[in-house]
Amino acid sequence: MALPAGHRFPVEKYELLYEAVRKHTASGLRLREAPEVSIDALARAHSNAYVEQMKTGSLPAHAQKALGLPWSKALYVRSLRSVGATLSASQAALKDGIAASLAGGTHHA
């Protein structure tokens, strides 16, 4: 996702964080690919209309502005995976005692 220089959302931070953490996998740290959250899980926090608008790129202008990112199919998939990563990390922390999501929780943290 190409954003203009100086944009408030530094996309490159995710790759830099991943590379920094990946160096520690020899110490037993496990990295897992973020799963997509289910639509049923999203419906617990968002209206069906909002989820559909996000999926199709038909969010009202004020909602798109609040996101701060241009809509794309990649943004939709990233959103599903970001929330999925948060839920997955929560479940892993309950099971293993510690876990984290490299994508962060965005505003759902």
Image (cartoon, rainbow, N blue to C red):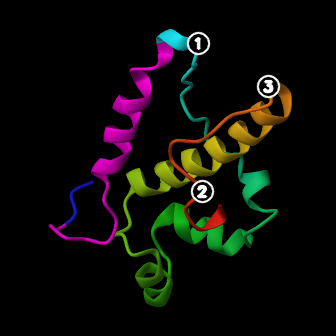
- The numbered mark at residue 28 is 1
The stretch in magenta equals: 4-25
Between circles 2 and 3, the one closer to the viewer is: 3
Three-letter residue code for mark 2: Gly
Residue 15 point in image, percent of width and height: 33, 39
Q: Secondary structure at mark 2?
A: loop
Q: Foreground residue, 54 or 5?
A: 5
User: Would residue 27 be found to the left or right of residue 61 on screen?
Assistant: right
Q: Foreground residue, 76 or 95?
A: 95
Three-letter residue code for mark 1: Gly
The earlier-in-sequence mark between 2 and 1 is 1
Q: Is residue 89 above or below residue 28?
A: below
Residue where numbered disc 2 is placed: 105
Marks 3 and 1, how far apart at CA: 13 Å
Q: Residue 22 occupies which quadrant of the picture?
A: top left
Q: Is residue 36 magenta?
A: no
Verify CB contact (< 8 Å) between mark 2 and mark 3.
Answer: no
Residue shown at 61%/35% (left/top)? 35
Marks 2 and 1, how far apart at CA: 24 Å
Q: Residue 19 occupies which quadrant of the picture?
A: top left
Residue where numbered disc 3 is placed: 96
Q: Is residue 55 above or below residue 63?
A: above
Three-letter residue code for mark 3: Asp
The earlier-in-sequence mark between 2 and 3 is 3
Mark 3: few, some, or many residues within 10 Å (few <14, many ≥20)?
few
Q: Secondary structure at mark 3?
A: helix
The earlier-in-sequence mark between 3 and 1 is 1
Q: Is residue 24 magenta?
A: yes
User: Would residue 104 be found to the left or right of residue 75 on screen?
Assistant: right
User: Would residue 36 be found to the left or right of residue 98 on screen?
Assistant: left
